């Protein structure tokens, strides 16, 4: 999935940098996951559970919305729903 | 390459070795001497019963050896936690292997329904179990590469 198509982006890399250049391993240790999971989240390849998302936000002491941003226009589910509505309206 | 991907590759190699050597052993020592054994249900029952513990023990030994070799070569410790992503990938892989085995089971029953000999059914059952376990490991590698 391209960056432009991402429907949930995150600022973890930036937040890590401003948190005294916290390493991925440190963040992983503080949130109870593996470093590979942090890498996957940062690259937008894996969307964490709500629990882990809150844990990450708590680690950086910021609200959840500062870590993750949702783009409904890129969400494939929304795209499907919209396409269905357009089809209905045409009928 | 991540630790889980390496572990899956080792597991695939282990599975291939176990099934390869076990099949060769059974063929050379039993089937070659008496082809009629293929139609003996007791022979297939014993073959299955021995294969399962042998495969488990060999896989455990191979994984232990891999962990030791990995520690010596990379100086990295094994991850001691299984997080939500690992569990999700595990579930997806189990689902894949489950469907492949079910398909194999249906095929095995189909062979009986079509009047084929029982050894064809047993062979399909063993093969589908083997393919299901391989597919599960391959899927694991792909999922870890993709992210989840």
Image (spheres, helix red, strand yellow):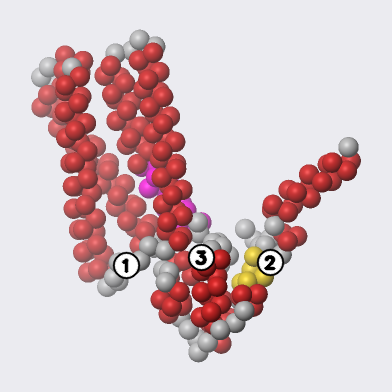
Q: Which mark is in front, 2 or 3?
A: 2
**Predominant SS of the magenta segment:** helix
| Residue visible at 39% across and 13% down in the picture | B113
| Residue visible at 22% across and 69% down in the picture | B72
| Residue visible at 20% across and 58% down in the picture | B65
Please check whether the numbered discs 2 and 1 fall on a single chain: no
- Mark closer to the chain start, 2 or 3: 3
Residue extent of the magenta highlight: B134-146
* Neighbours of disc 3 within 10 Å: few (<14), some (14-19), many (20+): some
**Residue B80: where, in percent of width, then height?**
32, 67
* Neighbours of disc 1 within 10 Å: few (<14), some (14-19), many (20+): few
| Label 3 SS | helix
Image quadrant holding the N terminus of chain B, namely bottom left
The reply to whether discs 2 and 3 touch (Cβ–Cβ < 8 Å) is: no
Which residue is identified by label 1? B80
Residue that sits furthest to the bottom in the current view: A20
Q: For residue B67, what is the image quadrant?
A: bottom left
Q: Is residue B24 visible?
A: no
Q: Which mark is in front, 1 or 3?
A: 1
Q: Chain of mark 2?
A: A
Residue that sits furthest to the top in the current view: B115
**Residue B55: where, in percent of width, then height?**
22, 42
Q: For residue B32, what is the image quadrant?
A: top left
| Residue visible at 37% across and 20% down in the picture | B109
Which residue is identified by label 2? A70
* Neighbours of disc 2 within 10 Å: few (<14), some (14-19), many (20+): few
The reply to whether discs 2 and 1 touch (Cβ–Cβ < 8 Å) is: no
Per the image, is B144 magenta?
A: yes
Label drawn at residue A40 = 3
From mark 2 to mark 3, how far is it between C-alphas? 17 Å
Per the image, is B135 magenta?
A: yes
From mark 1 to mark 3, how far is it between C-alphas? 19 Å
């Amino acid at each position: 999935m391209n960056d432009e198509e991402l429907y949930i982006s995150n600022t973890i890399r930036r937040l890590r940098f401003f948190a005294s250049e916290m390493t991925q391993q440190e963040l992983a240790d503080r949130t109870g996951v593996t470093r590979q999971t942090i890498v996957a989240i940062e690259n937008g390849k894996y969307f964490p559970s709500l629990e882990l998302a809150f844990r990450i936000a708590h680690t950086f002491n910021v609200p959840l919305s500062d870590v993750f941003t949702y783009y409904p226009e890129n969400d494939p589910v929304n795209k499907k729903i919209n396409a269905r509505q357009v089809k209905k309206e045409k009928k | 390459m991540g630790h889980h991907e390496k572990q899956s590759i080792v597991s695939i190699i282990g599975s291939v070795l176990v099934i390869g050597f076990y099949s060769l052993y059974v063929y050379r020592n039993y089937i070659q001497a008496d082809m009629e054994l293929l139609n003996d249900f007791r022979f297939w029952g014993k073959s299955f019963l021995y294969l399962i513990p042998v495969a488990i023990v060999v896989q455990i030994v191979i994984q232990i050896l891999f962990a030791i070799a990995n520690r010596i070569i990379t100086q990295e410790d094994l991850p001691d936690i299984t997080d939500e992503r690992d569990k999700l990938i595990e579930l997806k892989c189990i689902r894949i292997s489950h469907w492949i085995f079910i398909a194999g089971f249906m095929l095995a029953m189909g062979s009986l329904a079509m009047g084929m000999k029982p050894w064809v059914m047993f062979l399909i059952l063993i093969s589908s179990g083997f393919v299901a376990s391989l597919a599960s490991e391959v899927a694991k590698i792909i999922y870890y590469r993709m992210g989840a």
